[in-house]
Amino acid sequence: QVPLVESGGGLVQAGGSLRLSCTASGSPFFRPIMGWARQAPGGEREFVAAISGSDDTFYADSVKGRSTISRDNANTVDLQMNSLKAEDTAVYYCAYNFFWSPGLMADSWGQGIQVTVSS
């Protein structure tokens, strides 16, 4: 497994913005799909966004148009979330070598970072 370090979560008011960042301790020559999933209290972990090695991006319908995933290098991805809603409240998990269909799979998961949106 590749260690992942997440940062950037916190408490924000509805309508505000947050930027999540994830850095993997992986090879600089390997650009796997990286991305984010989230799990709300009492809910299942669900796909949020992903970016491929060629920088193709993928979004869940629930965040499309409000979020942008980007890649700084082979091992660092950021998720900019805007116009946050109370239903975005969840623990967000970074994923390395990430696949989300038919189910969520990744070689590594981050420890999770809390995002709380107050209404």
Image (cartoon, grey):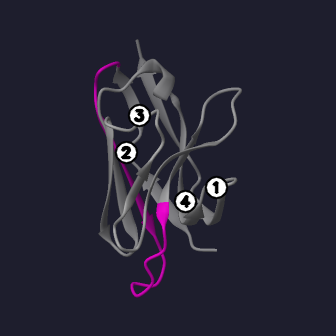
Residue where numbered disc 4 is placed: 95
Marks 2 and 3 in Cβ contact (< 8 Å): yes
- N-terminal label among 3 and 4: 3
Image coordinates of residue 37 in percent, x first then y, are 55, 47
- N-terminal label among 2 and 1: 2
- Circle 1 sits in a helix, a strand or a loop, which is it? loop
**In the rendered structure, does residue 81 fall within the stretch colored magenta?**
no
In the image, is 105 to the left or to the right of 80?
Answer: right
- N-terminal label among 1 and 3: 3
Image coordinates of residue 80 in percent, x first then y, are 31, 44
Look at label 4 and name its amino acid: Ala
Q: Which mark is residue 10?
A: 3
Residue where numbered disc 2 is placed: 8
Give the answer, above or below, for where 102 lies relative to 18. below
The stretch in magenta equals: 14-34
Write the residue at 38% across / 57% down. Answer: 57
Image coordinates of residue 19 in percent, x first then y, are 32, 44
- How packed is label 4: few (under 14 Cα within 10 Å), some, or many (20 or more)? many
Write the residue at 43% across / 78% down. Answer: 31
Residue where numbered disc 1 is placed: 101
